Image (spheres, helix red, strand yellow):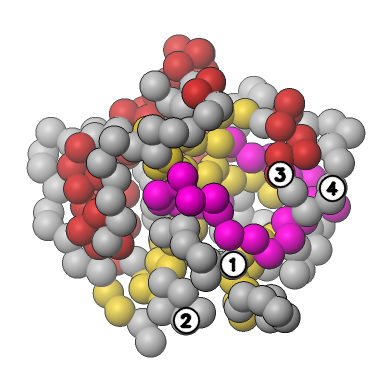
Amino acid sequence: MLETVRSDAPAADLPPVAVQFLDCLSRARHETKPFDFWLLERALPAEDVEAISALPISAPVDSVFNGRRETNNSQRVYFTPENQARFPVVKRVVEGFNDARVRAAIEKETGTNLAGTHLRVEYCQDAPGFWLEPHTDIFVKKFTMLVYLLDDPELATAGTDIHDGPPDFKYVATAPYGKNLGVIFIPGKNTWHGVGHHPLKKLRKSIIINFVGPEWRDKWELAA
């Protein structure tokens, strides 16, 4: 069943990233099976999507593809204060999602509680051969959003895969991959997802936006 998410009109003084995201959230398609997730279009300002995709950050090399991102932790890239100082677009994204009105809208539309959470944004460049096994995000993550960055027909099936849970982890659907498309879900015991039901044919670029609880251990990954 598809539902349309409603939200109040954004205030005129909101950062452009926040304005665009709030508009996106108001248009999001809410799917409820096998768990609640929201499919996104035009998630960020178009110029910011282009700027993120063009960041002068080399893709990881000699990555190990075993179904787990953490295997390659040493090569992962985050929107840290250092990268905010280097790249204006990184700062713009962080400022947009750190706005209290964005947090309030996310809470209203998804039912999550972001009190005391910290913003964590990862820039991903996944090479052919990359895959993620079906998994649920750890409990300390209170919000997960992926925004895809490229328009390439050969990546059309490279979005996040949605699965049923154990014992079979049956494949259900894939969030469409395309420039400025995305997906939101609130991590929980049944939010089984992955990447690779359709093998990657080209470099897959995306950002992952999380709000994480205060007990998050790797503080260096956080936006502030």
Label 3: few (<14), some (14–19) or many (≥20) C-alpha neighbours in 10 Å: some
- Relative to 81, say whether 103 is above or below: below
Q: Which mark is residue 45?
A: none
Q: Secondary structure at mark 1?
A: loop
Q: Position of residue 30 (x, y in %)?
A: 36, 73
Q: Which mark is residue 192?
A: 1
Classified by dominant secondary structure, the portion drawn in magenta counts as strand
What's drawn in magenta, residue-wise? 123-148
Residue occupied by mark 2: 33
- Relative to 89, say whether 178 is above or below: below
Mark 2 and mark 3 in contact? Answer it, CB < 8 Å: no
Residue 74 or residue 150, whichever sits in front: 74
- Relative to 150, say whether 14 is above or below: above
Q: Earlier in the sequence, mark 2 or mark 3?
A: 2
> Dividing the picture into quarters, in which one does residue 125 lie?
top right
Which residue extends farthest bottom? 1
Q: Secondary structure at mark 4?
A: loop
Amino acid type of the residue tagged 3 in the rendering: Arg
Q: Position of residue 87 (x, y in %)?
A: 49, 19
Residue occupied by mark 4: 65
Please tell me whether mark 1 or mark 4 is closer to you in this view: 1
Query: From mark 2 to mark 3, how far is it between C-alphas?
Result: 25 Å
> Dividing the picture into quarters, in which one does residue 158 lie?
bottom right
Amino acid type of the residue tagged 1 in the rendering: Trp
Mark 3 and mark 1 in contact? Answer it, CB < 8 Å: no
